[in-house]
Amino acid sequence: MLTEGRVWQPEPATPSDRAAVGRARAQRLLVTLLGDHWHAGRSPLPSGGLVAVLAEFGIAPANARATLARLTQRGMLERTKEGRRTSYRLTESASQTLRRGARRIFASSDSDDWDGVWTLLAFTLPLDDAHQRRLLRARLRWLTFWPLYDATWVTPHDRFDEVHEQLGELGVTDAVVLRSRDFELLPSTRARLEAAWRIDVLADGYQRFLERHRTVARQADAGAVGPSAALVARTELVNDWRALVGDDPDLPARFLPASFPRAQARVMFLRTATALAEPAQQRFEELVRTPERG
């Protein structure tokens, strides 16, 4: 049975906790769906169709409409109305964010040819701007930066242009970005960074991913997944993979144990996602044409 989420999450203890998890799941699923099926120039999607899409995942109409409202409030969706018909489209900023995310989600291989150069970012933000701080940290982690100290982050990848773009989008002007091979981590600093990378937890997450999606991967290879099942399976697959790579600093091979299962999981993910893409798209297009109900 396919499940959704990160490496592992305990069951919510109270009804309010379960409701919060359900709201978060619905939003993650819709973001994944739009990232997968939205393309530039597409007409806005009718609300009734999006509600029908989310129903495929067991999300009730009232919760689906609440999800549309929350993503609109977050600036990810733009609501339009023509007569009695309400439709939604991705905002331009959300579309750009999802396109950037797709490049990493669907990257075809691990890079083993590290040149030994690190990218370092040091920044300062107003102490009272907690929202901007949280947003910047989330975007830095997606770019594979990890903190040495609270406002000093590093990655072994060349993210010079990308981090400049993110700083500009967020209006962060007090920062230094540099690329250097002359980079020495003293023992305590290296130990803190390695602890933050959580390589053992990541390895467990990739192994769980392989186990969770192995059955549907075999069925997809055999062409035995119909459109309805393909939409759910591909969305859950991409959703789980997105969560994994979002927690992964994408370290060069020299920092990883030989048994690290990311490469095996990536091969299965890409093969299965490709096999499911066409029937999933077919079902999505059928559902978004569902007429609005009164």
Image (cartoon, rainbow, N blue to C red):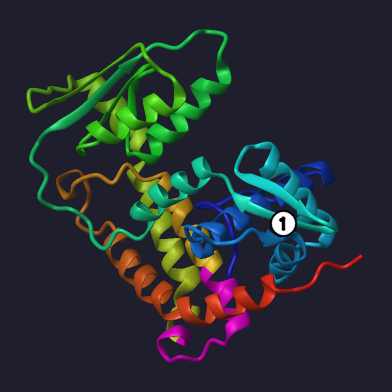
Q: Does 218 appear above or below 83?
A: below
Residue assigned mark 1: 87
The single residue placed furthest to the top in the displayed view is 127
Residue located at (56% from left, 58% from top): 34
Residue located at (45% from left, 91% from top): 223
Q: Position of residue 159 (x, y in %)?
A: 25, 36
Q: Does 282 appear above or below 97?
A: below
Residue located at (72% from left, 56% from top): 87
161 magenta-colored: no
Residue 191 or residue 250, whichever sits in front: 250
Residue located at (34% from left, 52% from top): 104
Q: Which residues are magenta?
A: 219-234
Dot 1 falls on a residue whose secondary structure is strand
221 magenta-colored: yes
Q: Position of residue 56 (x, y in %)?
A: 70, 71
Q: Classify the position of the C terminus by image quarter.
A: bottom right
- Tell me, yes or no, if residue 234 can be seen here: yes
The single residue placed furthest to the front in the displayed view is 83
Q: Identity of the amino acid at label 1?
A: Ser
Q: Position of residue 250 (x, y in %)?
A: 28, 46
Say whether residue 161 is left or right of residue 4. left
Q: How many other residues sit within 10 Å of disc 1, few (<14), some (14-19) or many (≥20)?
A: many
Say whether residue 216 is left or right of residue 73. left
Residue 109 or residue 176, whichever sits in front: 176
Query: What is the chief secondary structure element of the magenta stretch?
Result: helix
Say whether residue 190 is left or right of residue 249. left
Residue 200 or residue 48, whichever sits in front: 48
Q: Position of residue 13 (x, y in %)?
A: 76, 45
Q: Quadrant of residue 177?
A: top left
Q: Classify the position of the N terminus by image quarter.
A: bottom right
Q: Does 2 appear above or below 90?
A: below
Q: Quadrant of residue 210?
A: bottom left
